[in-house]
Image (cartoon, grey):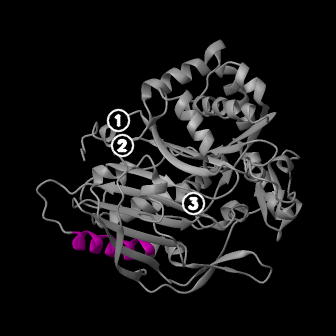
Amino acid sequence: MGAKVDFTVTVSREEIVAAVLPLQQHWLPLSNLDLLLPPVDVGVFFCYKKPEGSIVSFTYMASVLKNAMTQALVSYYAFAGEVVANTVGEPELLCNNRGVDFVEAYADVELRDLDLHNPDESIEGKLVPEKKHGVLSVQATELRCGGIVVACTFDHRIADAYSANMFLVSWAEMARSKSISLLPSFRRSLVNPRRPGCIDPSLDHMYVPISSLPPPKQHYQPTDHLISRIYYITSEQLDELQSLACTNGYKRTKLESFSAFLWKMIAVLAAQDGFKSTKMGIVVDGRARLGEGDEEKASSMSCYFGNVLSIPFGGQRVSELMEKPLWWVANQVHDFLEQAVTKEHFLGLIDWVEAHRPEPALAKIYSNGSEEGPAFVVSSGQRFPVSKVDFGWGKPVFGSYHFPWGGDSGYVMPMPSPAREGDWVVYLHLFKRQVELIEAEASGVLRPLTSDYLELSNYQL
C-alpha cells in the first residue's frame, strides 16, 4: 500500500435480495430522533483475505452472503423497505419487503495493494456501493488474490451506527448458521415525546429548524475541499495523550483526550487563515441514558433500532486552543459533553423536535462550517464490531466506516484496530489543508494506514 495502484471494478451481477419470509406491508414512523437526520447515506466496508489452502470460490461466498441476508432481513425488515413522504412531508418507512440491492463485482487488484489510507481513490465509487433505491445496498467484490471486500451503504435516517452494527453482526451470525444474538426492537414508544413536553433552553443552542438557518455562505476555504483519509494511532500514543489530558488531577477519557488533540490541530490552520474561533461536536448515544432507572426499558433500549443520537458542541477562540495545554482543551470538551450525557437531555431533545414538527431541524454544528470558522464532529466508533463480522471465512483483516457526507463540517470516527489490541483506526473526513497540517504536525501520533501495519495482526494479508 505504498505507491498508488490504479484498478478497475467490473460489475458481474446485480439483483434484489428480499426477506426469505413474506412480510405484511406496514408503515413504520420515524421517531423524533430519526427526524433530526438529513437524507445522507453512510458506508461501511470489510476486507477479507482468502483463507490459506481454501478452495472456497467467490460464487460460493456471494451465495452465503445473499442467503444469510434473506434470513437477517426477516428480523431487520426496516432495511428491506423504502423511505417515502407522508401527508405533511415528513419521511416515513414503508416496510414492504422491497429488498436490498446486491451487487457482485470484480476488482483487478490485490488486497495488499489497496490504498486504504486514501479511500477516496480505493473505496469511494469502487468498492462501496452507491445506494440508488431503498434503504440498504450491498456490494461484494472479488479481488485478484481471491480475497473479498463486503461493503454496505445505508440511509442514516433509518439507522445509526449502533443499529447498523447490530445488523452486521446478525448477518454474519446467519451466515455461520448461528442464532441472532440480539434481536432488534422497533418500538417507537420507547422514544415518544412527553405530554406536556419539557424543553431546556440549551437545546436551542444545539439544534435549529431548517427555516431558521442563515443563507448559505462561502465554504470554510473556497479553494479547499473535503477529503477522506484513514490513519492509525497506537495504544501507547493514546495513553500518552490521555496522561497529558489528565494533568492536574482531572480524569478524562481517551475519546475526550484525542478529540482535544485534534481540536488543537484544527485551530492552528484556522489561525493561519485568520479565523477567530472554531467549533467541535461529539456524537453521544442516548440508549443507556434513556434506560436509566428502568431495568426493563434499559433492556429494550439496548436492542433499539433507529437513531438515538445527540451532537453537543463547543466553540473556542483559536488563540486559546493553541496556547492552552491539552488538559485545558480536554476540560472544555468534557464540559460541553457533560450537558448531553443525561437522561433529561435526551427526553428534552425528543420534546424539542415534537414542538417544531413537521418542520425539519438539524444539529447546528452541521451548519457551522462557514465564514464563522472551521467545524468538525467526532463520532466514537469504539463499538464497531470488526472482529465479529465473520461470514464463515475468517475475521476481516480490516474494516471501517466511510462517510464522505458532503457538508461543510468535517467528520472523524475512531474505531478499534483489528491489527493490534488497544490501537485505533481513525477515519478522517476533513478539508485537504487540515489533513495536510495534521500529517505534518502530528505524524508521530496519527500515521497513515498501510498493509505493513495491518500485517501485525494474526490475519496477514
The image position of residue 124, as x and y in percent, is 48, 61
Q: Secondary structure at mark 1?
A: loop
Q: Nearer the viewer, residue 126 or 239?
A: 126
**Residue linked to disc 2:** 418
Amino acid marked by disc 3: Tyr
Q: Which mark is residue 420?
A: 1
Q: Main secondary structure of the magenta part?
A: helix
Q: Which of the pair 351/100 is nearer the observer?
A: 100
Question: Is 438 contained in the magenta span?
Answer: no
The boundaries of the magenta stretch are: 58-73
**Residue type of the residue flagged with mark 2:** Pro
- The residue that mark 3 highlights is 304
> In which quadrant will I find the N terminus?
top left
Q: Mark 1 is on which residue type?
A: Arg
What separation in Å lies between label 3 and label 1 (alpha carbons)? 31 Å
Label of residue 58 in the image: none
Q: CA distance from mark 2 to mark 1?
A: 6 Å
Q: Is residue 145 left or right of residue 322?
A: left
Instruction: Give residue 454's position: percent from left, percent from top.
Output: 32, 41
Q: Is residue 285 visible?
A: no
Return the disc, 3 or 1, that comes first in the chain's sequence. 3
